[in-house]
Image (cartoon, rainbow, N blue to C red):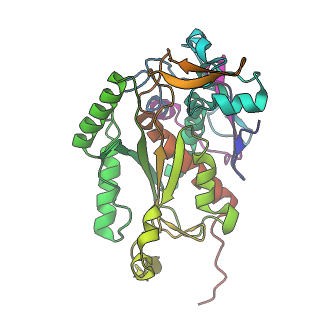
Amino acid sequence: MASTFGTALRVTVFGQSHSAAIGCVVEGLPAGFAPDLDELRAFMARRAPGQANWTTPRKEADEPHVLSGLNQRGETCGAPLAIVIENTNTRSGDYDDVLHTPRPSHADFSAHAKWHGYEDVPGGGHFSGRLTAPICAAGGIALQLLASRGVRIAAHLAQVGDVHDVPFDALRMGPEAQRHLLSQIEALADGRAFPTIEATAALAMIAQIDEARAAQDSIGGAIECVAVGLPAGIGEPMFDGIESAIARIAFGIPAVKALEFGVGADVASRRGSRNNDPFGIVDGTPAPLKNDAGGNLGGITTGAPVLFRLALKPTPSIGRAQASVNLDNRSDTTLELRGRHDPCIAPRAVPVAEAVMALAVLDSWLAFPPQPSTRKD
């Protein structure tokens, strides 16, 4: 089972939802960077379960324990950085009913088809959203390193059900749009519990989540993420592009079903005259004058904000009776779940999207940086 991604920055995720611990190993971090572990804890707390009535009741501190990779001054030293997060609040008995009866739309069925009963089922095993905690641990370090290079990354809950937040102002270019985008990012950094730009959107989204939970159901959502301050020239054509790097990690997040960059699927209804981003000289440098492409062309950054959106399916684990099968005697049956589950996965996945962006961007910057110019003016 391969659980590693990255080229110059390689991240391996290990553990299961109900194992003694989960964690990550990060190889390729530049030496000499001193991460702020308190800042890392605060970042990971945004993803941690059990903090509000719109999350699972399972409570985990998600305390990152750094085992290696830092010297005595707390700086990266060139060795692999290993981080462990203990699982302290598991209730494996809640999953007795699904050991032989797969949850509809969950990986229980496909895991059984692959490993024939040897898979770890409780909590979802290695398929659990719990495994996004190590991604946040690695991504939290990458976020700090990128911030030291002048890059800001932020995400918000763009949609829950039929309720939408205002979008990031990342497709326009120019000083006014940049100021507005930065003000949106600052608003998200003010410590609010629910990750939307507009407070009214948060209230309406929470109401939809409450309705789904009361009906023993779940609801889907979408996340929008942006990176500001990247130079042009990061990435490679074709399979090593910045979009490919993001997609590889993003689809490792359980429940992600769609990924868009820039205006996304809207390109299918456009003509080129509308979709094309014209160029101009801005402060003496060639640059796009709008950003419908989402900050990259041909897999290489343009210097405009990199923007992506993730769509996440409703949590498969719901309390309603659902049709399933008994895998042992191959008979039809009905499954009614117990246990603790998020009625909507999307709110806790917002910092995970930021971690995905940070890890993909930092890896691409280290592996495929802008090449020095040989032009002689």
Answer left or right for 244 relative to 208. Answer: right
**Residue 132 on the magenta segment:** no
Q: Residue at 63%, 88% (x, y): give it.
A: 376
Q: For this rendering, which residue is in front, 140 or 1?
A: 1
Q: Residue at 66%, 40% (x, y): give it.
A: 76
Answer left or right for 74 relative to 61. Answer: right
**x then y, percent, for residue 55:** 41, 25
Q: Tell me which corner region of the image, top left, top right, bottom left or bottom right, holds residue 333.
A: top right
Q: Is residue 362 visible?
A: no
Q: Quadrant of the C terminus?
A: bottom right
Answer left or right for 43 relative to 26. Answer: left
**x then y, percent, for residue 217:** 40, 27
Q: Is residue 164 visible?
A: yes
Which segment did they paint magenta?
Answer: 16-43
**Residue 20 on the magenta segment:** yes
Answer left or right for 289 relative to 258. Answer: left
Q: Quadrant of the N terminus?
A: top right
